[in-house]
Amino acid sequence: MCGIVGYIGKQEKKEILINGLKELEYRGYDSAGIAVLSDGELTTFKSVGRICNLENKCGDFVSNGFGLGIAHTRWATHGKPTEANAHPQMATFSNVVHNGIIENYQEIKQSLEKKGHSFLSQTDTEVIVRLFEENLKDTKSPLTAFEKTIASLKGAYAILLITKLAPDRIFYAKSGSPLIIGKGETGIFFASSDAPLIGYAQKVCYLEDGAVGYMDMECFEMLADIKMLEQNKVYAQKEGFRYFMEKEIYEQHKVLLETMMGRVSEEGIFLESLAPDFFDGITEITICACGTSYHAGMSAKYLLERLAKIKTQVVIASEFRYAGSVMRPSELFIAISQSGETADTLEALKLAKKNSLKTLAICNIDNSSIVRESDGVILTRAGIEKGVASTKAFATQVMVLWILSVYIAHQKGLLDENALKEQITSMLQATKATEVSPKLHERLKRLSKRYLHGHGFFFIGRDIFYPLALEGALKLKEISYLHAEGYPSGEMKHGPIALADSLLFTLALLPKHLLYDKIKSNVEELSARDATICAISSEDFESADDMIYIKPASDYMEEFFAMMVVLQLLALEIAIKLGNDVDMPRNLAKSVTVE
Ligand code: F6R
């Protein structure tokens, strides 16, 4: 995802900025840029692709002596990854870099256009710098103009702005996106995470939401809550977590908000990347994927059929390729993939295209093969996922598919305004339900000790909680190497219950708001046969040996996302107790580009 770096001081600025951007490369990006203000000159370089392209662009440019610089890696959300859309975004005498999304940029843009501004990019970010210069017409003070600009913005942001009118300072604002200011021997530093600051800054201040102001060489000590910076790079990239997987589980709340940004708002659901008539003539859907993405697809079947009343089948890509499946012209083919490079999914997609199906990619990586091959795309915006066992990618896939289901349902007139609002509220609550509470994590750490041995795990659930059970079992298998299976709970008595004894661990997903009594009976049948039951629910369940409580929820999707986090953390803690490297599980690769 996007990254920010900034510097004030006498050192060579280009080098500091580019080194900082390199520390953020692991987060994923598709273009990059820097702007340097020194000796009254404001110089900007931008390029698409890798940071080495930006270095080539900068050529021999140097900026010795006092000055300022801001830099950015962009992960496209509004507008394609082009040089014009890369940051810094410029107006006449000022430059800005921005992480996050400005939700009301269209309104601001229209009002600025009426005042004569012409926009050079498709980004939401350009409105910030143009509004700043517009506000400067009414006030001589850049700080007042900046504060007024920030007060007009809705959405999430971390912003750095420089202007020729104030060549000794960088203006900053933070709300909902991280921003850090650091101080070292050679000057003042800014970054969107710790990694670029290591080796440069010794003291840091993690800005709070609502922070707006400017920083020069003098005023760092006036910041509240200054801390010493831990000088270990890998530790910094993991942001204090033991494993990337753990960090990614904790990040889910934040990335889900990114997934929703610009798509889900009080006014409704918008899928900007798709033409309004994209679904015209579509009567059924085939979803195709592998592994965790396949489980997200299975979850979507319940949502698409229940909400949008559209017949949906979900297929495993490696099976679909050779099954000689019947394809009908009115069928939409949806490929789901985190990496966008999974060989089986890509080949299945090509096969669907060859059979003249309309195709849609739900993918985390823009410009990946699957995205390039598809007629339409919805990016999941999970940011780069480093843990081999997928977590936040799954969460964002399910969210995108839920958004899509509500979008189609609304287009088809199946949801009135009230029902639409309920869905939107539920999405926000579900996102909130992924915030990890320290109490829950501590409980799972302690509980995990009891689940290290035994002869197997069953994860059981019904309806949309069945694919979640499959995903819980897959997470455990991948990183703990213990045998685990996911089952629809109603299926147990048709065979698997024969395995029940006290060394069979059953993880039962018991949502209060979906088929609670039915699942409860299925679990009781297992309990009666001595299986060890660990129930995940907001409700007490007397037959359980262990309970993992989720917070009381208003609907089943909120429970789905809350239970997803429980399953991910439980797998993580069991694997850690068994001494495994959860970020690099044996035999697995992050991107499976072979058949
Ligand atoms: C599980 C996991 C894999 C992937 C599968 C598909 O944690 O990561 O099962 O989900 O290999 O990969 P993508 O989504 O990149 O197509």
Image (cartoon, helix red, strand yellow):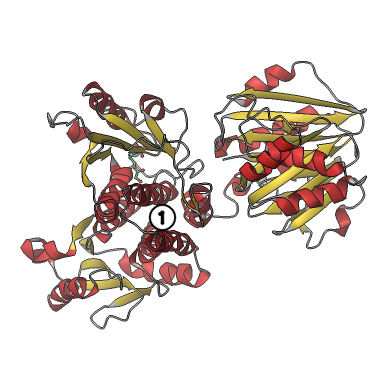
Q: Considering only vertical position in the picture, is 545 above or below 571?
A: below
Left-right relation of 324 to 361: left
Observer-nearest residue: 220 or 153?
153
Furthest-front residue in this view:
114
Left-right relation of 155 to 416: right
Left-right relation of 288 to 224: left
Q: Secondary structure at mark 1?
A: loop
Task: Please say whether residue 579 is visible from this viewpoint.
Answer: yes
Residue 115 rendering spot, x and y as whole percentages: 76, 37
Q: Considering only vertical position in the picture, is 531 above or below 6?
A: below
Task: Please say whether residue 233 is visible from this viewpoint.
Answer: no
Q: Considering only vertical position in the picture, is 514 above or below 2?
A: below
Task: Report the number of discs.
Answer: 1
Q: Quadrant of residue 101?
A: top right
Residue 189 rendering spot, x and y as whole percentages: 79, 43
Cβ of mark 1 under 8 A from ligand 1 = no
Residue in the picture at 22% in, 45% down: 312
Circle 1 Cα neighbour tier, 10 Å, few/some/many (<14 / 14–19 / ≥20)? few
Observer-nearest residue: 594 or 587?
594
Residue 153 rendering spot, x and y as whole percentages: 69, 50
Observer-nearest residue: 302 or 584?
302
Quadrant including the N terminus = top right
Q: Which residue is mark 1?
A: 579
Disc 1 marks a residue whose amino acid type is: Gly
Residue 203 rendering spot, x and y as whole percentages: 79, 52
Quadrant including the C terminus = top left
Observer-nearest residue: 267 or 83?
267
Furthest-bottom residue in this view:
542
Residue in the picture at 69% in, 30% down: 119
Residue in the picture at 38% in, 45% down: 585
Q: Considering only vertical position in the picture, is 60 above or below 225?
A: above
Residue in the picture at 72% in, 59% down: 210
